[in-house]
Image (tube, rainbow, N blue to C red):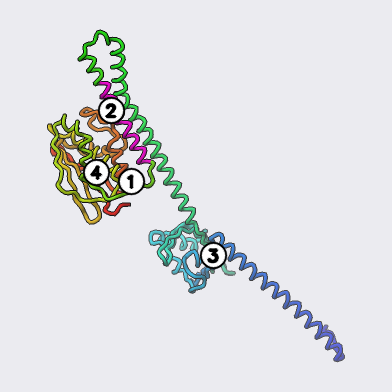
Amino acid sequence: MDKRIDSAEELAKELDGLYKRLSELETVDKEKRRAVIDSQARMSKAEEMAHFGSWKMNIATRESVWSDELFRICGFDPGSFKPTIEDIFRITHPEDRQRAAELASTAIDTGKKYDVEKRIIRPDGSIRYVQSIGQVQYDIDDKPESFVGSFLDITERKQNEEALRKYTAELEASNEELDAFAHTVAHDLKNPVNVVYGAIQQLQESFKEMTFSEINEMLNLVSWSALKMTSIINELLLLASVRKMEEMTVNKMDMGIIVSNVISRLGNEIKLSKAEIIIPDNWLACISYAPWIEEVWSNYISNAIKYGGTPPRIEIGSDESAESIRYWVRDNGHGLTKEQIELLFTSFTRLHEFQAQGNGLGLSIVKRIIDKLGGEAGVESEVGKGSIFYFILPKTPI
């Protein structure tokens, strides 16, 4: 039963009480609104710090609501446009777009969780990796009403994973190479060491009975073996320098002088083999690291002498394309089969062991040098028609 008010005084008291209750309710409402605003601000800050954005899509209208951080992850200013589901797929990388769309459609149709890693392309062209997770929400009639979810920027994680994968692959390759390296060095050093040991042992045991000619022959063997071991050690030092050097000073090279130096170094081999070497009058200039390029020429020309015809006829030259210069050494040897060509430039692979006492390191070092200089090393050959060993250097150094 309603309370009866009989006087103006009672009415005034009742109204005063009503005003007080309304004031209290207004205060509570303001506190609730302030709490909601504070909560939203904290959520926005947390999303920003975690690179975590949220989204909600109305399934019927396809209109979406993005959090500020989702705008930033995608490369847009927060609130700069009213997004739709098409906007998400428009910035999704073309290679990931169909899979993401199919998973989203399946999630809406079945109620299953939506979870996909994909790439997005920002307006500035940069690519980010994101993990998007979503779930369907249903209305009171149990019909799909909205699709809500999140965007987590995982670019840094993906970059770390790729760096770790690359490091692991390089480590495995390095370990395999070191095994082959140790085997090759042990094999190549074994022969000259055995020759030295045998010669010294024979001199110790039979020196008094040996003729001058026999002693001289033993000393020549020791000298040859010492030179062989020195050559192997020098190549090992070169290989180590190529592996470790991170930066080098490149300059415009006088290729004529570099090749002339190599021919002087190989003078004894050239004389003994009666090799004919044809050198161009003019060279195409290139900017690179001269000490390493000299070693490449030395390896190529030395191999042409060893594996060329009888006598060796060696032609040296160069040609150019728009962006690179190709230097080459042509010999008149027997040429190589496809199977032999596939073995070349593989780390520490030996070829034609029966022909010459090569140490197995040369072409491996050539490939490592040219790779590090941003170029390419290779060979063109046909059985019966000789071989052309070449290296290509960019006109603009790396």
Distance between the Cα atoms at labels 3 and 4? 53 Å
Residue interval drawn in magenta: 221-243
Residue 94: x %, y % from top left: 38, 62
140 lies left or right of 106: right
Name the residue type under label 3. Ser
State whether residue 135 appears in this view.
no
**Does residue 241 show up magenta in the picture?**
yes
Residue 37: x %, y % from top left: 64, 71
Residue at the disc numbered 4: 378
Name the residue type under label 2. Lys
31 lies left or right of 347: right
- Looking at the image, is 92 positioned above or below residue 292? below
Residue at the disc numbered 2: 228
141 lies left or right of 220: right
Along the line of sight, the residue nearer the viewer: 227 or 163:
227
Residue at the disc numbered 3: 54
Residue appearing at x 48%, y 55% in the figure: 156
SS at mark 2?
A: helix
Contact between marks 1 and 2 (CB within 8 A): the answer is no
Camera-nearest label, 4 or 1: 1
Residue at the disc numbered 1: 372
Residue appearing at x 29%, y 48% in the figure: 288
Contact between marks 3 and 4 (CB within 8 A): the answer is no
